[in-house]
Image (cartoon, grey):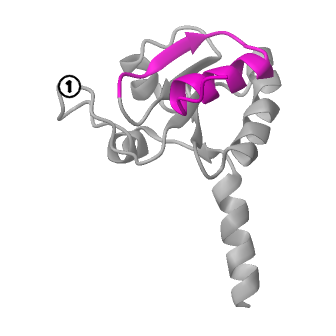
Amino acid sequence: MLLSMITSLSLWAEDVVYLTTAQFRQRIFDYKTDKEWTFKGDKPCVIDFYTTWCGPCKRLAPIMEELSQTYCDQVVFYKADTERERELAYVFGINSIPQVLYIPVEGKPMLLKGLYPKEEIVRIIEEFLLNNEN
C-alpha cells in the first residue's frame, strides 16, 4: 500500500499542474497585495497559457508534458486556460496564444509569445531558469 502511494505521488509530481488564478496568487505571486515582483516558489516554473481549441497550443502540450517529466526535480510546469482564468490572462496581457511565462527563482519572469521548438524551450529552461550555460 505504501509503495503504491509513493509511486502515485511521484507520478503526480511529474505532471503538468492546471493552475487557477487563486493558486497563482498563493503559489507564485500575489499581484493584488504586492507591488514589486516577489516569487513565492522554491523552484523555477513554467506557465503555459493556452485554450482548448488552439492548434499551436495542442502541439505545445505534449512538449510541456515531456519536459515536465524530464525536469520534474528542478522546474514546476503549469497550464493556465485563458478562457477559464480570464483575470490571470488579463494581468499578463495575454491576447494571443500560446504564450509561455518562464519564472526563475530570482529575477523577473520572461513571457514569450508563440510556439517555440522543443530545443529552444530546453535552451530557455537550461539557461534562463537553471543558469546552466553550455
Residue at image x 68%, y 77%? Answer: 6
Q: Position of residue 32 (x, y in %)?
A: 22, 32
Q: Is residue 20 left or right of residue 77?
A: left
Q: Residue at x 43, y 12 (%)?
A: 93
Residue at the front extreme, as displayed: 134
Residue stretch rendered in magenta on the structure: 107-134
- Give the camera-side residue of 57 and 130: 130
What is the three-letter code of the residue carrying label 1? Glu
Secondary element at tag 1: loop
Looking at the image, residue 52 lies above or below residue 24: above
Whether residue 5 appears in magenta in the rendering, the answer is no
Badge 1: residue crowd in 10 Å (few <14, some 14–19, many ≥20):
few
- What residue do we see at 49% from left, 38% from top? 44
Residue to which mark 1 is pinned: 36
Side of 70 where 73 appears, left or right: left
Quarter the C terminus occupies: top right
Q: Is residue 49 visible?
A: no
Identify whether 54 is placed above or below 25: above
Return the residue nearer the eye: 81 or 100: 100
Asked if residue 67 can be seen in this view, the reply is: yes
- Tell me residue 50's x, y (percent): 64, 24
